[in-house]
Amino acid sequence: MYYASVSEIPQGGAEARERALVSAPELSWALREAIRVAGEVDVALARRLHLRLMDNMALGHVMNSDDALGPAELSARLGISTGSGTELVDRLERAGHLERHRDSRDRRRVSLRAAPASVQSVLNELAPLFASLDALTEDFSPAEQDVIARYLRAAAARMRNYIDSPAAVRDS
C-alpha cells in the first residue's frame, strides 16, 4: 500500500513506517530489524565504554578492518575531514584506545591498532550478547542453522556490494 502524502503514513516504529511505504518478504523485514538494532547496540556499547559514538565507530573500524588503516583512511571511512580524523585519533591515543605504529618500509606511513586493553574491554562488554546469540542457535536444527547462515552470509555479501558500488547519481 502506498500513501498520497507523508501525513497519511501510520505513526509507530521505523518498521511500521517503512512497511507502509514498501513491501518485502518477512525474512527481509527481520533482517532490517536486526540491522537497526545493531546500530542501537553500537550506541549502547559506546555508552558502556564511556566513548563518544564517533570514537566507538572509529575503534570498531580499526578493530574490524582487514587492512591496516592510517588516520586518512579512517577519516574517509567515517566521512570526516582528515583534520577531524587526526583530532579523533589523537584523543583515542591519549585515552589508551589506539596505538600508532610506523611502517617498517615507509617511516612516513602510520597504521592504527586498537590497544589490547581496549580490545579486551570491547569483548568483555559484548560477551553476554555473544553468549546469548550463541545459545539462540540451539533453538534451530543443524539444517535450519545451515539455511539461516547461508541467508545471512549472502545478505552480508550483498551489503558489501552496496558499500563498494558507486553511489547512484540523482537528478535534482
Image: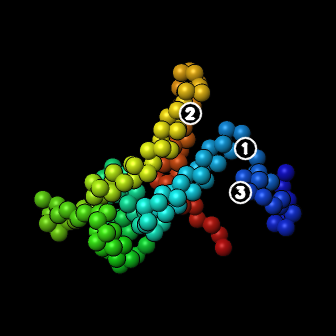
Q: Residues within 10 Å of mark 3 (few under 14, many from 20)?
A: few
Against 96, residue 21 (above or below) is above
Q: Amino acid at mark 1?
A: Ala
The quadrant of the image that shows the C terminus is bottom right
For label 2, count other residues whose C-alpha is less than 10 Å away and answer few (under 14), some (14-19) or many (20+).
few
Tags 1 and 2 in contact by the CB under 8 Å rule? no
Disc 2: which residue: 136
The residue type indicated by label 2 comes to Leu
Residue identified by numbered label 1: 24
Residue under the point 39% across and 53% down: 122
Tell me the mark number nearer the camera, choosing from 3 and 1.
Answer: 3
| Residue 51 in view of the camera | yes
Considering depth in this image, is 87 or 40 the residue closer to the camera?
A: 40
Badge number at residue 14: 3
In three-dimensional space, the C-alpha distance between marks 3 and 1, rounded to whole angstroms, equals 14 Å
Q: Amino acid at mark 3?
A: Ala
Q: Is residue 72 visible?
A: no
Q: Nearer the viewer, residue 123 or 29?
A: 123
Indicate left or right for 16 with 121 as reference. Answer: right
Instruction: Give the Cα separation between the discs numbered 1 and 2.
Output: 25 Å
Mark 1 residue element: loop
Spatial separation of the CA atoms under disc 3 and disc 2: 25 Å
Residue drawn at (55%, 41%) of the image? 155
For marks 3 and 2 on the same chain, the one whose residue lies earlier in the sequence? 3
**Side (left or right) of 118 relative to 77:** left
Q: Position of residue 130 (x, y in %)?
A: 47, 41
